[in-house]
Image (cartoon, rainbow, N blue to C red):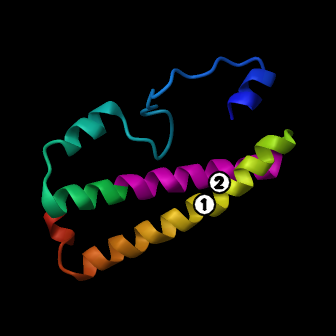
Amino acid sequence: MAGMLQRWHQALPSPYQAPTGMGPGMMSGHDWAGLHHRYGHAFTGHWLDAMMANRSAELALCRAELRAGASPQARHLAQAMLTDRGAQLAWLQRWHHTMDHAGHHGDRN
């Protein structure tokens, strides 16, 4: 990704800088701070919800890139991420489903 950004004359992000609240599915700093006050199943449930929303947003971006992207490198990266993030989302959904059926859904409020 760094190589593509350099070829496009775009600034590279600072190392270890976590983007927050940059679009649909991304958690804001406030959202992340709210997780500090949750424990056990409440934390897990909210974390799963956030990660599923994040992965869904990433998949939407990948699909948009595949539909309309001009860069072969970016399209290749989008396809790889679509496969990887799709598998991660499926795993998160299975975990979420397991939690819901184990009776922990109500603990997230």
Which residue reaches farthest bottom?
101
When asked about the image quadrant of residue 48, the answer is bottom left
Query: Residue 51: x and y, percent?
Result: 40, 54
Q: In this view, does 88 lie above or below 101?
A: above
Query: Residue 74: x and y, percent?
Result: 77, 42
Secondary structure at badge 1 equals helix
| Residue 78 visible in the displayed image | yes
Left or right: 13 in relation to 31: right
Q: In this view, does 96 lie above or below 65?
A: below
Determine which residue is flagged by label 1.
Answer: 84
Amino acid type assigned to the residue bearing label 1 in the image: Asp
Tell me which residue sits at (57%, 58%) in the image: 85
Left or right: 95 in relation to 67: left
Tell me which residue sits at (17%, 59%) in the image: 42
Residue 58: within the magenta? yes
- Segment colored magenta: 50-69
Left or right: 40 in relation to 46: left
Residue 40 versus residue 68: which sits nearer the camera? Answer: 40
Amino acid type assigned to the residue bearing label 2 in the image: Met
Q: Do the residues labelled 2 and 1 touch (CB within 8 Å)?
A: yes
Determine which residue is flagged by label 2.
Answer: 81
Quadrant of the frame with the C terminus? bottom left
| Residue 109 visible in the displayed image | no
When asked about the image quadrant of residue 27, the answer is top left
Left or right: 43 in relation to 32: left
Secondary structure at badge 2 equals helix
The alpha-carbon separation of the residues under discs 2 and 1 comes to 5 Å
Count of number-bearing discs: 2
